[in-house]
Image (tube, grey):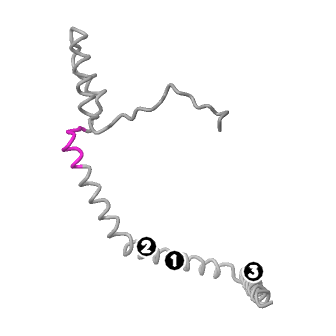
Amino acid sequence: MNQKVYTSIFYGIIALALFGLIAQLIHEPAKILQRFLFIGLILLILYFIYRVFTSSNSQRSQQDSYRKAAKQTVKKYNTQKSSPIKKSMNKSKPTSRKSTSSPLLKKRIKDSSHLTVIEGEKGKKKDRASY
């Protein structure tokens, strides 16, 4: 019974607030619009202050550590920002096919040395009837 009293009081307060809002909207619409804009401006200022003080330190440290890791990766694998397709298009065409295939294969293996291949059972199909 205690919960029913609280919910009825809560709905009564909301009904009175809506009645007051509608009455003020009918009598002074410019003043209520001014109040809403002022409240919105204050909330926006408080939000920006919150964002400046709370997330600045953690985001900066995460960004710094990401930049450091990216620089280490570039140094370790000697990667460049331009794509290998553009490099191969810019080079002049060689005369024999053997010379083009072997450097490209060596280059691909060298660039992706940090990747590993996981071999699975591709040929074997699952027997769904046994489940």
**Tag 1–tag 2 contact (CB < 8 Å):** no
How many angstroms separate mark 1 from mark 2 (CA)?
9 Å
Spatial separation of the CA atoms under disc 2 and disc 3:
31 Å
x and y, in percent, of residue 42 in the image: 50, 79
Residue tagged by mark 3?
22
The picture places residue 35, in percent across and down from the top left corner, at 60, 81
Query: Callout 2, which amino acid?
Result: Phe
* Residue 6 location, quadrant: bottom right
Of residues 34 and 45, the one drawn nearer to the viewer in this rendering = 45
Q: In which quarter of the image is the C terminus?
A: top right
Q: Name the residue under label 2.
A: 48
**Which stretch is magenta?**
71-80
Expressed as whole percent of the image width and height from the top left, the position of residue 121 reads 47, 30
**In the image, farthest residue toward the top:** 95
Q: In this view, does 24 lie above or below 103?
A: below
Query: Badge 2, how many Cα within 10 Å: few under 14, some, many 20+?
Result: few
Of label 1 and label 2, which has the lower sequence position?
Answer: 1
Locate residue 39 relative to residue 72 in the image: left or right. Answer: right
Which corner quadrant holds the N terminus?
bottom right
Residue 43: which disc?
1
